[in-house]
Each structure stands twice: as C-alpha cells, then as structure tokens.
Image (cartoon, rainbow, N blue to C red):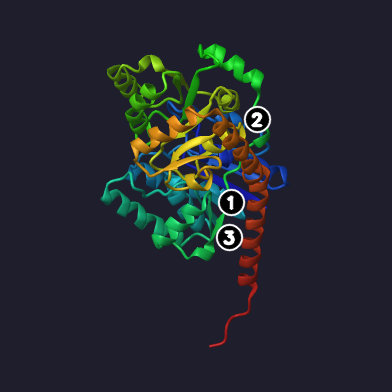
Amino acid sequence: MRICHIITRLIIGGAQENTILSCRGLAELGHDVTLIAGPETGPEGSLWDQTKGAGFETRMAHSMRRSVNPLHDLKAGRELRCILRDLKPDVVHTHSSKAGILGRWAAAKAGVPSIVHTIHGMSFNRTQPAIVRAVYRRLEKWAACRTAAFVSVADAMTDQAVAAGLAPRERFTTIRSGMETDRFFPDPALRAGVRREWGVREDEIVVGTIARLFVNKGYEEISAAMPRICEQNPKVKFVWVGDGAHRTVYENQLTKQGLRDRVILLGLVEPDAVGRVLNGFDLLVHASRWEGLPRAVVQAMLTEVPAVTFDNDGAPEVVWPNETGIVVPLGDVDGLAGGMIRLANDADLRRANGRRGRERCLSMFDWRTMVHDLDALYRRIAEYTSAKTNAPPQAN
C-alpha cells in the first residue's frame, strides 16, 4: 500500500519517535511510505536526522506550525491537500493535534480511501482552560467524522475519547507505543561509568526524570516533594534529562529551596543515548499531568529501573502497583514523595520491581509488534472499504 503519516513537528518526543518507527517498519514490510511534518523544532531537539536513510520518503509542510493561527492553518491545510493529491496514498495516518485536524481534513478533500488517527494524548485535557477544551473537542468531533479508525496508545485514551463522544468504541484499536526494546537493558559496567561521570557514588540513590522542562511535565510537584525526600534520605540525588522554556524557572526554584546542588541537569539527550542514561538511575519519577503512554517509564523498566508515577492517563497501564513501581493519585505531592522515599530506602524492592517491569515491557512494547498491528489494521480497513465500495446498491 501507499501510506502517508502526518505529524505536526519532528521534535524529540514520544509521539515523534513512535511515528518514525512506524514509518520505518512499514517500509521494511514493503509499503511505499511517506512522512510529512512541519519545519518547527525547538529546545526539545530535532528528529529530522533520524529519517535519513530510514527507507521512507519525507515531505516538509512548510506552512504547518504548532501554534494556532487561522491564516497559517488554512494555508497548511491547503498545502497538505496538494501533497496528498500528488502522492495519492491508500492510507493517511495522522498524529498530534494540529496535524490530526488539518491532515484528516486534507485527506478527506484529497479523496484518500482510508484515514487513521493515533491518539498519543487527548488534545483537550485537564491542563487547559474550559474554553480551549471545548474548542478542541468540537474540532476533534468534526475530524472524527472523517476518520475510518482510531489507534490508541493506551486503553485510557479510548475510554476518554468514547466518553467525550468522539466515536463509538468499535472504531478504536489499542496499539501500544513501540520501542526498540533491544536497545534498553541493564548493564552494571555502564551504570558504574555513567555515575562516575555524574560524580555520584555507588551508595547514593539517583532519582531520575526524563521530560521537557516545561509546565504540566511534573517538575512543580517533584520540586515540592524534594525537601521531604532529601530530609528522609540524604544520599538521594536527582538527575533531570531534558530541556525547555522553563529551565531557568526551575533552576531558580531549586536555588531558593537550597537544593540546586542535589540536582544534575543533563539537558537534551539524543534518543540513542537514553538507554545509557537510564542505567545510571536507581528509580524514575514520572509526574506528568497529561500523558498518553509514558515512553520514558517503559524504557526505564526495560532497563530494570522501577517507577513512581501519578495514576493519570496511560501510566497505570505500565506501572503496576507493588509489582513494577508505585502509583499515587494525580497531584498528590505527599504520595509522590512517599513513593520515592519507599523505593529509595529499599534496594530489594527496587530490584524486584525492576525485574518484573522488564519482563512485562519486553513483550508488550516491542516496535515490531506495533508495526505488525498497524499493518493488520490498514488491511482490515482496506478490505472493509473495498467491500463497501463494490457492494450493490440497496433496494428502496
């Protein structure tokens, strides 16, 4: 089949990594694959280089931007429509909010037979003002009428979309966000080397976080929990991986708390280096207020690093309480602190949770499984569309 994936921008992020792996895998299966994205990157870093030599074509939609601008958005929609009319794909598969709306509109206008959309995280969510949620919900319902099938990276995304009235449950398929699982594994020698680079002793406990330095990624809650953790266990240190617009804000906050020397800010880390960094962690804290499926948590568990997380969105589908980590109510700073303290103080619990996490994630999140499931979904849609097209007209 001729397949086209569309995403708003190729920054370093979970949805973007998922999309590139999908395109690569589908191309390896013999499909003719094109990835379309806007030109924006930012402090999060860019994944455009990862598309080179990956076996699929790329097109840049120069008008597509993340921010809402009616003039740019209208221009981007028309640009996407022209690209799709040129490519004549059998399937268009959209990702992210902006590309999801504009891409599905353009695909419908271009007469694409099968339109699919992945929900990596709801475009209208608890972090937004009510009027913004209402607008996005209306747009998503409008786009849903042009969507043959939805892919959810977690069951929670299906539940939320159905509850919002976007589409009936039978149009949703859960396909877990795929990882290159063979690149994440525990390595004692690597652990020792990474911790030496950080200036961390073997007897110290590293609590790691991998997320953009931006609002709603949980740094406010983590910072609020840190004084209690440091008081309870003076051997705890924190490593923050990522960059973003709020880096200076968080650094100033840590300085005011007298905790700046307890935090190592690594900045941006290339996706290829994440497995190396994870080997230096003793536990991962993931406190995002809005997430589809937390890839950083899966990657940590593949490295036998247990996690502490809030119970929102897809996180409880990865972190099983008392088996692979600790889950606490959304926004519960005391619970977050307590979970980190419990794992920091119990090496046996960390090892047991980490081993179980790796066992589960190896089978659930391999990227080849994701690609196989996407291929099967496209074929089912194509068969249904063909049967519907070729069906004789109904008698009155």
Location of residue 28 (image quadrant): top right
Taking the image as shown, residue 99 lies to the left or right of residue 333, namely right
Decide which of tag 1 and tag 2 comes sooner along the chain. Answer: 1
Q: Is residue 386 above or below residue 218?
A: below
Three-letter amino acid code of the residue under disc 3: Pro
- The residue tagged 2 is 185
Q: Say whether disc 3 or disc 2 marks the residue closer to the N-terminus.
A: 3
| Residue in the image at 40% along x and 55% along y | 140
**Residue shown at the point (53%, 49%) measured from the top left:** 153
**Residue 381 percent across, percent down from the top left:** 61, 62
The dot on residue 175 is: 1
Residue 179 showing in the rendered view: no
The earlier-in-sequence mark between 3 and 1 is: 3
Total marks placed: 3
SS under mark 3: loop
- The type of residue carrying mark 2 is Phe
Label 1 with label 2: CB-CB less than 8 Å: no
**Front one among 207 and 30:** 207
Amino acid carrying label 1: it is Ile
* Mark 1 → mark 2, Cα distance in angstroms: 23 Å
Q: Which residue is mark 3?
A: 113
Q: CA distance from mark 3 to mark 2?
A: 41 Å
| Mark closer to the observer (3, 1) | 1
Helix, strand or loop at disc 1?
loop
